[in-house]
Amino acid sequence: MRLESWRTEKRLQSGEELWYYTWHVGGADGAILKKATPVEVWLTPDTVQEDVRQHVVWYHRNEDSNWGYAFRQQGLADVMGRVKDPLLKRTFGAAITGKGLKRIDKLTLTSAAPEKHHAVCIHPLTAQTESDHEWLAQLDGQIARTERASIGQARGMHQKWWRAFWDRSYIRVTRAPLSWSGNMTTAVSSPLRIGADPAGGNLFKGFIQRVRVFTRALSPAEIAALAAAPDVSAPAGAVADWKLGQLDDGAVTNSAQAGMTAKVSGSLTVTEHAGRPALRFGGDGFLEVANDSALDLAQAGTLEAWVATDALSPEGARIVDKGVPGTANGYVLDTYPGNSLRLISQAGLLTCPGPLAEGKWSHVAATFGQGVRRLFIDGREVAADGQTTAEDGAQRALTITRAYALQRWVGACAGRGAFPIKFNGSLFTVDTKFVNGSSYGPDGRLWGGDYWWQNTRLPYWPMLASGDFELMRPLFEMYFTRLPVEQARTKAWFGCDGAFMAETASFWGMMSVGDYGYQRPASLAKGETENGVMRYYWQPGLELTHMMLDYYEYTGDDDFLRERLAPMAEQYLLFYHTRFGRDASGKLRVTPAQALETWANVVNPAPDVAALRQNVSRLLALPEGLLPESLVKVCNDLRPALPEVALKQADGATVIGFAGEIRCQRSNVENPELYPVYPYRNFGLGRPGLDIARATYQRRMNKETWGWQQSGMQAACLGLADEAAQILAANVKMGNPAFRFPVMWGPNYDWVPDQDHGGNLLNTLQLMLLQADGRKILVQPAWPKGWEADFKLHAPYGTTVEGEVRDGQVRKVGFVPRTRRSDAVFQTAALCE
């Protein structure tokens, strides 16, 4: 056995690596600004013990700390004396031991003699100690204590824990046919681009010979015929045919019909590659076709091209793009991740495993129509979804079940530590190649080492229905430990009471230094972040309170209510109560504020208002005597002052608004207007305004479904069974093809494996089967016709529900306690929509 150390030398971080480690500053328009840190950032090597002990020992120790920088930067230097530096002298490492093993060098253990069985022990330890000798002594003591226990005892405890974990909750889908009834794509006003996205990024590098667009889904036989040679005549339905081997005055004529000329933007060169005339795309040019309704392809279409890509590009490149950046509106055919062919549309993502051959001509095509989407390479189907055969339904069911179980296992592996799960890779980060080909080791993470609430929360919401309550406690403990720092920051910045929970912050509570700003303009007031999409972002503490209220309803843990929930809820509510004024009618006027990161300057953002209304009413509904009088008073003072969730008119329908008033341009791709549906449940099944909420969902601006997007859960909460099923089926197929482990999601918006994507997958499936509304238990509220499953899930008030779904009905259903059956509302799957 040999240790493979990640950190072997001291080196200065620079360029892209530093950006990935510290990433942060965004402009008010949502653009990311890459700003250098004002100090050098060094990576230091691990220490591997050189002594003669018969095991391998290594550790990493922080002999210095940048902990105080954020306090001084953000005007909180006086707070440093009240809290402890959690970084200085922190040492983490491990020892490898094994009976009958001897050390032949500092990295390697080998057996003294041939053996059929070996028992190897790895002893990890993290501690803050005055010296490395003290840490080593603690490690020796831990090894001695561990080795006094027998392997049989340890294995028995291990097996007992995992048996309880798997027995407490499960979902096993046994049949999952699909039938897509909506449009395959969304009509957009964007131009069509060949070789670039609408923002001029994701530039194709290589050669493109021909691109065609059809208004119907060509058959597999027709695709195979087109793949035989690049000069094959097009079958019926072609609205565009651009032969890129010739330019006429900087443009390529559409040979299928008049109009829709593709014009060169930047630099493209007519050349020859492997005996074929083509356009050379060198990464500094693309073709653009003005918007034309003939290119909408709402119900069906085919995108087809002959391409030869350059060397693998981890960020991918566009072939055909008629979409809206950051959304699933329109359609995109590109190569991502790496040179893997991918289709993006309203129906979700479809990605084929394995990359295109570099430098060689490939015929690529995507077809969509009648609920079925397919990808082809060289005339061969390489990916498909939407089929409804019994075989497809069974295979899809198996894929969903496997993904559900493995993702839950991933959460269990990472959820029992001292700190919450990292959304950007969890414990399963790997040595990743960056865009420029450099490798920075498994320590590298997009979005760095801080915690981002919008991402951190998503692996935790599904732990309620799965009953994994102990895994949620590290999340609550970290934010509770940070509360004094947040109170001090709130008072120092705004002179008000309470606390606001920063969206991006270190685990000890200081706002991310890049977001606050390294070289802040003089125009920024104290407490205003340089990052424009974080400047007025207040709502994370409200969602944490909402989750903690759910945790209390599920567990009935009165100690948790008194010691954690109540003090945190009071501080987060006090912030709104004392920070913001009232309008002429006495209603709270939350401004400056923002609706998530998407609308960076608004009045009364929908997420904040929805959360305030829910949290205040839920807290006041708790039995008398459970809450401190101070919290009850804050709630009673706030309740009459809370505004309504804003409504507006859109396309002749009443829908939920982003906020009461918008004062800015859109800067991200979230749907804050749907937060009153999920997570805050102001609207939904069994509640007033369901038609309004469904109309809002149908008109949502951003229709992407992957990563941290909440479309799947929101569809389920609105009883849109087929929509939720389509989203689930698309998301479950998004394992990264570069890895054998099937739940290495992403990177999507973040990193591999993307824990937001995995968490949302669990949550969507759970909400399709079971939802809670106060004491009501909604059984299969968004379960599609034809789907079957066995399940055991948890509900509030210490309840478990176990049963099976067959032929649209829940059978053999059991409730613990049995009295909760009277609170159940059963929904026939065929009537879900």
Image (tube, helix red, strand yellow):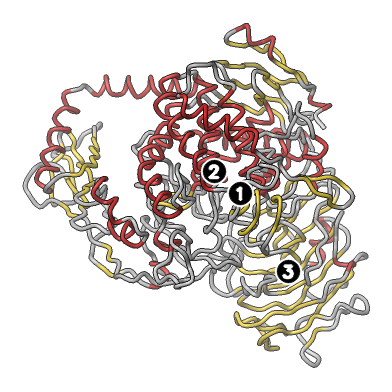
Determine which quarter of the picture holds residue 828: top right
Q: Amino acid at mark 3?
A: Val
Q: Amino acid at mark 2?
A: Tyr
- Circle 3 residue: 320
Quadrant location of the C terminus? top right
> Looking at the picture, how far across and down is residue 443, in whole percent?
36, 56
Q: What separation in Å lies between label 3 and label 1 (alpha carbons)?
A: 43 Å
Q: On the picture, is 787 further left or further right than 766?
A: right
> Looking at the picture, how far across and down is residue 81, in whole percent?
23, 49
Dot 1 or dot 2, earlier in sequence: 2
Marks 2 and 3 in Cβ contact (< 8 Å): no
Q: Is residue 764 visible?
A: no
- Circle 1 residue: 590
Q: On the picture, is 821 further left or further right than 416?
A: right
> Looking at the picture, how far across and down is residue 207, in whole percent?
66, 78
Q: Secondary structure at mark 3?
A: strand
Check the image and report above or below for 453 versus 816: below
Determine which quarter of the picture holds residue 287: bottom right
Depth check: give the residue in front, 749 or 236. 749
Structural crowding at the residue carrying mark 1, measured as other residues with C-alpha within 10 Å and reported as few (<14), some (14–19) or many (≥20): many
Quadrant location of the N terminus? top left
Residue shown at 62% from the left, 16% from the top: 802
Q: Amino acid at mark 1?
A: Val
Residue shown at 63% from the left, 36% from the top: 680
Residue shown at 50% from the left, 31% from the top: 548
- Circle 2 residue: 576
Q: On the picture, is 37 further left or further right than 796?
A: left
Q: Secondary structure at mark 1?
A: loop
Marks 1 and 2 in Cβ contact (< 8 Å): yes
Depth check: give the residue in front, 830 or 715. 715
